[in-house]
Image (tube, rainbow, N blue to C red):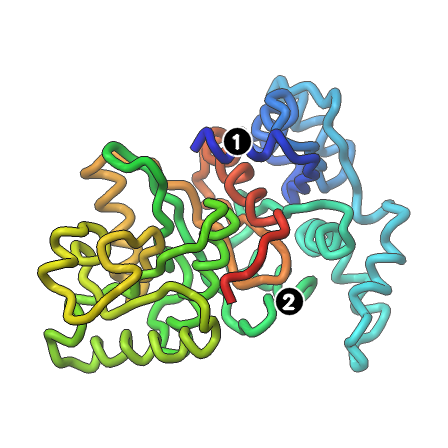
Amino acid sequence: MQQFIDRARQGRYRVVYAEGAEPRILQAARRVVDEGIATAVLVGDRADIEAAALAASVSLDGLESVDPLTSDRREDYTGLYLQGREKAKAGMAARLLRKPLHFAAMMVKAGDADLVVAGIAHPTRRVIEAAGLCFGFAPGLSLPSSFFVLSGPGREQPLVFADGALTVAPDAAELAQIAVASAHSAQCLFGRPPRVALLSFSTHGRAAHPLVDKVTGALRVARELAPALAIDGDLQADAALAPAIASAKTRHESKVAGVADVLVFPDLNAGNIGYKLVQQLAGAQAVGPILQGFARPVADLSRGASVDEVVVTTAVALALSQERESPQ
């Protein structure tokens, strides 16, 4: 994942960590700054941050901090939050923005930071709630989803796996949204047009089953959402990744079969099992989950994320903050 760290260093990014007093966050933020990846902003009570930093032997030199309760940006963020919300009340918005997670999300919404990172001390549903309330979904999307980036031996470029952490049983329309969001994420990460495979136990209709019908239905919807996107399915995993197998199994010309770099799994069972098998059996490095589908970048950490994982996740998620043309 060094390529993403190197890319992050070329930008002038500000990352806001919503859980500023958490020891692993402090250590990761220290590394993010020391390694020139980004500027780090810690959200929380300054006294709590200082006490936690002292206990963790982390220097706060060069690390910024902001307290939602005393920030001079509170009124600006409250006004920004209320825009377009006719029924929302100022008092309710002000109380909401006292919460570090929502305050951090509004920093990104306002352009005061490029990425919000959270999850060490918040469940995923709370991170999603803050992102949805504060900056909403990307144009044409209404579903949050997630992806992992996997890199390992034998492949020059990493792969995007989606959705391996969030959407349990998507229907065809939801699976199409996951595919389009994953394509945009991949384009931001790799800097080239993505090739998206909708995975199944069937390739090009060789099996008849409602689960296959869901995948082919998702293909139709995805092509309506993003007509220029290179996407195909139903495809078995080997037909998606191996040119020789794709040549033997596919029934029509495909720009994706054999060369896919985005793998969209039909449900969370398949996605979660798939990425963990590749991680454990093939020794692949997995980074994520990274949330997608939102109008602004947000990274959701696992409760058990290591300091290394926080740093690499930060670097990968920063790639999503770069302005690139959507595959739509």
Q: Label 1 neighbourhood size at 10 Å, few (<14), some (14-19), many (20+)?
A: many
Mark 1 vs mark 2: which is more N-terminal? Answer: 1
Residue 319's image quarter?
top right
Figure quadrant of the N terminus:
top left
- Residue 203 numbered mark, or none: none
Q: Residue at x 59, y 45 (%)?
A: 117
Looking at the picture, tell me which residue is in the foreground, 28 or 179: 179
Question: Is the residue 27 above or below the residue 258 in the image?
Answer: above
SS for callout 1: helix
Which residue is the site of mark 1? 5
Instruction: Estimate the x, y position of residue 291 in percent, counting from the top left.
Output: 50, 55
SS for callout 2: loop
Q: Residue at x 46, y 62 (%)?
A: 145
What kind of residue is marked 2? Gly
What kind of residue is marked 1? Ile
Question: Is the residue 27 above or below the residue 317 in the image?
Answer: above
Q: Which label sits in the foreground, 1 or 2? A: 1
Question: Is the residue 211 above or below the residue 153 in the image?
Answer: below
Q: Is residue 182 left or right of residue 247?
A: right
Q: Residue at x 22, y 51 (%)?
A: 241
Q: CA distance from mark 1 to mark 2?
A: 27 Å
Q: Is residue 79 left or right of residue 154?
A: right
Q: Is residue 286 left or right of residue 270?
A: right
Instruction: Estimate the x, y position of residue 69 in percent, counting from the top left.
Output: 83, 48
Q: Residue furthest front?
A: 253
Instruction: Estimate the x, y position of residue 242 in percent, counting from the top left.
Output: 18, 50
Q: Residue at x 14, y 58 (%)?
A: 247
Label 1 close to label 2 by CB (< 8 Å): no
Looking at the picture, tell me which residue is in the foreground, 54 or 63: 63
Q: Label 2 neighbourhood size at 10 Å, few (<14), some (14-19), many (20+)?
A: many
Looking at the picture, tell me which residue is in the foreground, 96 or 160: 160
Which residue is the site of mark 2? 136
